[in-house]
Amino acid sequence: FEITPTAEAGDFLDRPLFLPQNHFHTFTLPAGAVHLASSEIFPNQAFRVGDKTYALQFHAEQGPAGFRRWQERQGAPYGTLGAQERDEQDRLMEAHHAAQLAWFSGFVTKLFG
């Protein structure tokens, strides 16, 4: 799904990016959190508390092999809120995985050095 940076995102996310998600719920931000990213269906996709504590609702760490395991598990939630059909998931993973991996590698490098 397309994840969009908020005005407060800074260098966390500098442009919209398609990233995997595997959830069907949302939450409110904790007191003092900086809202970093949202999506059309789920407004709170990422936030930060302090300088080094991040919470991500999307799964940028998930590559094609892990994504396939999600797709093949019993009870995969096709047709529910926030889930595309499998052919659409395959198309989007193919189109956006390289950008996802580049973003995630950069994020982890900045965070941990």
Image (tube, helix red, strand yellow):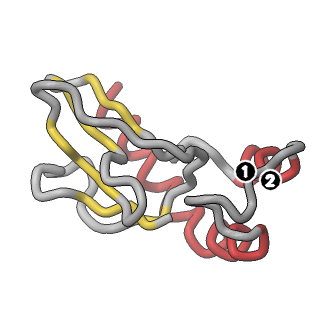
Vertical order, 48 against 84 (above or below): above
Question: Is label 2 in contact with label 1 (beta carbons under 8 Å)?
Answer: yes
Identify the amino acid type marked 1: Phe
Q: Residue at x 53, y 53 (%)?
A: 101
Identify the amino acid type marked 2: Gln
Q: Residue at x 89, y 43 (%)?
A: 74
Position of residue 98 measured from the top left corner of the image (x, y, whole percent): 56, 64
Residue tagged 1 = 67
- Report crowding for label 1: few under 14, some 14 to 19, many 20 or more residues within 10 A (C-alpha): some
Q: Is residue 62 left or right of residue 2?
A: right
- The kind of secondary structure element at disc 1 is helix
Position of residue 9 measured from the top left corner of the image (x, y, whole percent): 18, 50
Q: Which mark is residue 71?
A: 2
Q: Quadrant of residue 113?
A: top left
- The kind of secondary structure element at disc 2 is helix
Q: 109 or 46: nearer the eye?
A: 46
